[in-house]
Image (cartoon, rainbow, N blue to C red):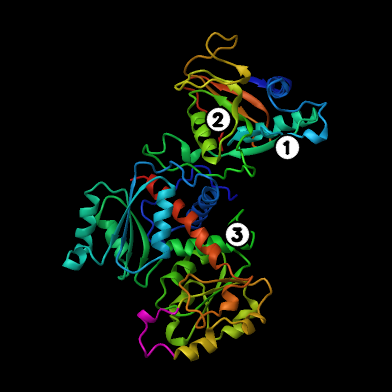
Amino acid sequence: MAETQPGYHWPHRHLLGLEDLSAQDIRFLLTTALGFDGVSTRSVKKVPALRGRVVVNLFFEDSTRTRASFNLAASRLSADVLEMAGKGSSVSKGETLIDTARNIEAMGVDVIVCRHHHSGAAAHLARSVDCSVINAGDGQHEHPTQGLLDILTIAKRTGRTDSFDFSGLTVAIVGDITHSRVARSNVYGLIKLGAHVILVGPPTLLPGAFTDIGCELSNSLDDVLPRVDVVNMLRIQFERLTSQAFPSVREYSTRFGLNAQRLSRAKPDLLVMHPGPMNRGVEIDSVVADGPNSAILQQVANGLSVRMAALFLVSGAPV
Amino acid sequence: MRVLADGDRFSELIDSLCVGISDTIASPGHPQASGGQTPESSPKDAPCGGWALVGVRSRGDVLAQRIAERLSAERFEGRIGTLDITLYRDDLSEIGPQPVVRTTEIDFPIDGLNVVLIDDVLMTGRSIRAALQSLMDLGRPRRVWLGVLVDRGGRELPIAPDFVGLDLTEGADEALAPGAKVQVMVTPTDERDAVVVFDEGEREGVERG
């Protein structure tokens, strides 16, 4: 187990992105998540840690996995959970995000879990309310709990949960980097823990600025694949793409899709991840997604522990 | 800081805990298993379940290990688990940073087991309450005993130990002043084995994990 420095306490009331966290914060949160793993496997899948607290899921975008995962995580901590959606609420009557949030807060809420289509929405919310805010995805900015669960999955599969030290590990993130909040959160977290990160995608979807924080960029998955330990295949977000930037689905799939033939040229113990939901046959083939290299379902399981840790830690942070 | 027990005295405290535990386990009416038992009726197969030592982090787990070693020298068989009670503490909702959550490691079903909970110092009884709740969430043990290296007195809940190494409660030979604070140090977590007392107002010099 990673040793925490004496006197260290989790300092953040909000979890808005991995860019704001130190390596020590990330290691502490992931170590805490390991402590929550057992809760999901025993007969009573509940601990009383957040008894009497209220968590609100405020989602302005579609979500299955993240929303369900946060709901279950809060329930397993014995918090009460309130589900709110953008559609079918006052927001569609013209209420602003902040007004909605303040009204919810007035009901005595402790944590707001927010997903919104605008980058920076969660930070805006955090400045406007007194309760804790957890970012569950804001536009093209960050999706911190996804980044953390990906990192936890890598640590478990590569035997690095003692130290969460990723030096010597090479991780490729493949896809539409420009529009991906999952990629951003992964990059910030992985670099802070010492990993080498290669971003792979078509030139139009690969922002050059990432080299400033130490990422390597590549337009060829075939060149990169033999020397990476982990590959994270991003979902092609057809809903965010403009036709000019994106090649045809067939061209993308041919050059950047992970299929059995490509996998045969990679390291035999290559770890394959995908944040879901998958476009089978586009960015990843079924034989790979369902094969022994895949950690996709473990990612989902780890998401629960990471979200329990996030809810637990922000709830106890100093005001 | 005063040292109440270290070296041989510390070993004696653990021995006296072990004697109490092994007497109870071997006594008629309890299903287990003193030295003369045949292999066919090992505790694992006994209808009432075997027995287990469960240590409460972060000193009770090491003590449970120590006790198990002594008991196994007398050919006792039992399982050992570790309980992290952080998530069950009753002071979590008070303002303050969250404590470090560690893992509970009980990799056997506790339903029907005879469990001896082991902790280092018993004072208010609140951590034992948390430990009991945590244990019940893992299953339904047949019976639970409590063994502590030091009973310091000062209970705030109706909880009493079954086995005590060192009695410092009111009326005992070495009774403590109410403000004094007892700490147990145990290798390898700490540098040495000792029971120490910090008198009221004295700064605690030992970093607790």
C-alpha separation, residue under disc 1 versus residue under disc 3: 35 Å
The picture places residue A247, in percent across and down from the top left corner, at 44, 90
Single out the residue that lies furthest toward the front: B47
According to the picture, the residue beneath numbered tag 3 turns out to be A156
According to the picture, the residue beneath numbered tag 2 turns out to be B205
Where, quadrant-wise, is the N terminus of chain B in this rendering? Answer: top right
In the rendered image, is residue A11 in sight?
no
The picture places residue A282, in percent across and down from the top left corner, at 50, 83
Asked if labels 2 and 1 touch by Cβ distance under 8 angstroms, the answer is: no
C-alpha separation, residue under disc 2 versus residue under disc 3: 36 Å
Asked if labels 3 and 2 touch by Cβ distance under 8 angstroms, the answer is: no
Whichever of labels 1 and 2 marks the residue nearer the N terminus, that label is 1
Q: Is residue B5 above or below residue A248?
A: above
Secondary structure beneath disc 3?
A: helix
Q: Looking at numbered disc 2 in the image, what kind of residue is underneath it?
A: Gly
Q: Is residue A301 above or below residue A198?
A: above
C-alpha separation, residue under disc 1 versus residue under disc 2: 47 Å
Secondary structure beneath disc 1?
A: loop
Asked whether, in this view, residue B177 is left or right of residue B141, the answer is: left
Asked if badge 2 and badge 3 are on a common chain, one would say no
Circle 3 marks a residue in which chain? A
Q: Is residue B80 above or below residue A111?
A: above
What residue range appears in magenta?
A236-247
- Give residue B45's mark: 1
Asked if labels 3 and 1 touch by Cβ distance under 8 angstroms, the answer is: no
